[in-house]
Amino acid sequence: MTRYIRRAAACCLLLLAALLVNAARVQVVQAPSLDDNPANRRGVIARYAQPRGDVLVSGKAVTGSKDTGQQLRYERTYTRGPLYAPVTGFSSQVYGTTLLEDAEDAVLAGTSPLLSAIPFWTELSRARRPGGHAVTTVNSSMQEAAFEGLAGKRGAVAAIEPATGKVLALVSSPSYDPGVLSGNGASVTDAWRRLNASDAQPMLNRAIRQTYPPGSTFKVVTAAAALDAGVVTDPEAPTDTPDPYPLPGTLRTLPNEATGCENASLAYAIQWSCNTVMAKLGVRVGLHGMLDAVGRFGWNDTGLRIPSRVVKSNFDTRMSPDQVAMSSIGQFDTTATPLQMAMVAAAVANGGDLRYPYLVDRTTTKGGETLESAHQTSYQQAMNPATAQQLQQMMVKVVEEGTGKNARIDGATVGGKTGTAQNGVGNAGTPYAWFIAYAQADGSPLPAVAVAVVVEDAEANRADVSGGGNAAPIARAVMEAALRG
């Protein structure tokens, strides 16, 4: 009898072990696939069962959550959504998350392990803490100045604090209200379809996700390369450049829109934007020298994050001399994001030390306790300090006496560079108007801001498009807001 009891006990033990193994298989091994199964709505329900943490600008929340009373209970709301959409992105119950809502999703949704007092407890328990907050570096006054300056025109503005890398403004126009995508009803799918079908591409973040030919603003980079390489030792010396300039290896010549460019100095070429001088200097620096220089500023970097992903600004790695010439004046295949061009101005303003740009100053708990703070780091030494000082002088002269007079600000030193970039096959499209600049208040030890503006208004009169006329006034408004503090 005892033998049968033992056999029954062993059988029960075996069944119990099998049950435990199967439970472990389901709860551990198969857990990821079950979580990802579209039929499993528990994760989605849990995600929207509590309010989401907020994105803060200048100490105030620009996001919120509303109780819908539905199965997916809490829905994202946005304060002045179009103004801050290039910063926040959207959080949608149908279409997921983008930009900062995506990059800081774990903190905002309450799933980050940093929110738990016990290490790894969030991962083990799958519990959600109250959503934390993402405190941005954006200055609300500067953001508003940039948004109002673009006034619905297609374009973008990026502004950086040169000494730290803080992103102070990030505007893309035309914009959209991310709140129309927050829920899950028919109105959301209709809004998604309408926004994606629009020729204006309002959901495209032009400040960090769109590249443009930088045109003459790129001449600042070429000037830095020429000075660092020793191709130019005296910015005031003649460069022995003909006007027009014969493009190497071709029968074509490169003209100037400015006058007085024949045999002009580097300083004159920056002040009045001489294509011929800058193209020749780029050829003299050579492809490898130019690649080295542009890499220090951030071109061809596929890993830039702020923490949202920034698309690569392009400078071709294989080119003929005539193509190098055109690339050196910001044409051919050379492209840049507005953020990239703001980084150029910031590097000049900060003595050649380019700081890594960042958009989130810190993340906090719901109660405001800091979870993580940003670490200010150097991206690269973009140029020698002596080169930066020379470029500062040249860019200041652009604003005081040259093509950038519309950016002058009383009580501040402003350095800038205008640009008008060709657009379309055979330059048939309306050119893009560019302006990059930095501003430093008189008596201040550090520059307050570096800014880049691009305007691509297809309805503008071609003859009226210029960096000094279209983009510089917007940059001035942003810099004035920065100087006010």
Image (tube, rainbow, N blue to C red):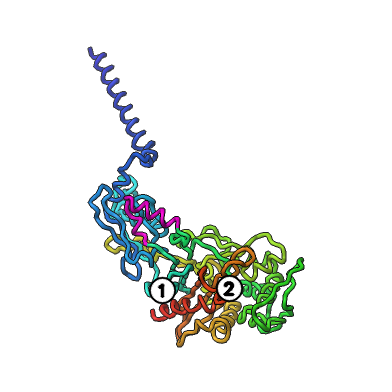
Point out which mark residue 420 bears: 2
- If the image is split into quadrants, where does the N terminus sit? top left
Q: Secondary structure at mark 2?
A: strand
Residue type at tag 1: Glu
Point out which mark residue 160 bears: none
- Secondary structure, magenta segment, majority class: helix
- If the image is split into quadrants, where does the C terminus sit? bottom left
| Image x and y of residue 329, in percent | 64, 71
Task: Pick whichever of labels 2 and 1 is earlier in the sequence.
Answer: 1
Q: Is residue 52 visible?
A: yes
Image-quadrant location for residue 482: bottom left
Residue type at tag 2: Thr
Q: Are marks 2 and 1 in contact (CB under 8 Å)?
A: no
Q: Is residue 381 visible?
A: no
- Reply above or below: 295 against 257: above
| Image x and y of residue 186, in percent | 33, 50
Q: Badge 1 is on which residue?
A: 148
Q: Secondary structure at mark 1?
A: helix
182 drawn magenta: yes
Which residues make up the magenta segment?
177-197
Image-based side of 44 in relation to 215, left or right: left
How many marks on residues? 2
